[in-house]
Amino acid sequence: MRIKDVKAWWVRIPIEASRQHRSDFGQVRTFDAAILRIETDDGLVGWGEGKNAAGSAGDYGALVHMLNHEVGPQLIGRDPADISVIWEMLYNGVRHEQAAASGHAMPQIARRGMSVAAISAVDIALWDILGKSLGQPVWRLLGGRKLDRMPAYASGGWAPADKIGDQLKSYIASGGFQSVKMRVGSMDGAPHISAARVRAARQALGPEVEIMVDAHGTYTVADAKRFVQLVSDLDLTWFEEPVIADDKAGMAEVRASGPVPIATGESEATRYAFRDLALLKSADIFQPDPAFCGGISEAMKIGTIASAFNLRFAPHLWAGAPCFFAGLHVCAASPASFIIEYSLGANPMIHDLIEDEIVVKDGMIAFPEKPGLGFTVSQKFLEAHAQVAP
């Protein structure tokens, strides 16, 4: 079996005005992603996803061009089962043969960011192909699933203080969720405004519902520490991305400043970044995004680091279907996983791009049983929302 064809699209799906929300990224009017299709010479198709922006906040033209014109040609004729070998080839670039023989990485200069986003898309698609070729769900190839289903948390929460309780209650009612996440940070202005919204949420939901908060890295260290002090009595499950990902030492300072667990990682790429988070004691929960961190292969390695440092693992899954399903399989197999992110904002890249239905029942999501990643792309829908190839 050999790779015959590689094709990527910038898929942009409009979100109807009534379902749009505003955050620190601005008004989210579309959901965008780089969607990748890899076909083998015996007709198997694998789907992947790469990300370099949030929602409609970015341009995917360069990433799609890289996949179609730089990465794709390197894959033609290769065995798609050589997943780790291909990962290292793309990461190390022209020195990949030296790296393989020497037993250590010699990465290309542009080894992070868009390069790893492209690798992520390829890696997810190759795992999809391997599962389909063997007639097995990907989680079985990763070592098996530890549970049939796992708790999910409802991710959203942009409403002001006087409406946040009702918004989060609507999430709970929609799928029986026992955990919810709301946004805080620069979208509110000063920390005390965000803290007032969180306090209103806790008063509305009572003590039994878990509440997570996400600042998208928009606080300074001082403001993040101030926020922690203001909410220290509200029993938060975690405080996500308190400061920018580049300030790992600052994040460690925030973590040490109070009782609220720190979660981070959606802006990090590769096991090396998460190794640094662990060594600096910057986080309690790792949140790699499979479409940005390096795919399923790298997400599993990151989960292993979390387990080795007695940390927990909850991948960032505000994404399209290939990334979301990749995260499900990683959560099924990782010993450090404990909860699944499920977006309650408008997300047509999950629900409309595929022919399958994702069901949340009693706040739980069942792991896929079908071979590969376990979904079928609606080719008609994809073609209707694909941008002109760069």
Image (cartoon, rainbow, N blue to C red):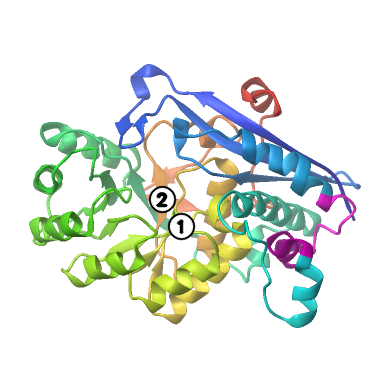
At 33% from the left and 48% from the top, the residue drawn is 216
| Label 2 sits on residue | 341
Q: Which span is picked out in magenta?
A: 74-94
- State the residue in front, 202 or 71: 71
- State the residue in front, 227 or 81: 227
- State left or right for residue 19 relative to residue 320: left
**Is residue 79 part of the magenta span, yes or no?**
yes
Q: Report helix, strand or loop for mark 1.
A: loop
Q: Report helix, strand or loop for mark 2.
A: strand
What distance separates the C-alpha of mark 2 from that of mark 1? 7 Å
At 44% from the left and 66% from the top, the residue drawn is 337
- State left or right for residue 128 relative to residue 229: right
| Label 1 sits on residue | 315
Q: Amino acid at mark 2?
A: Glu
At 26% from the left and 60% from the top, the residue drawn is 238
Q: Position of residue 54 (x, y in %)?
A: 45, 39
- State the residue in front, 96 or 142: 96
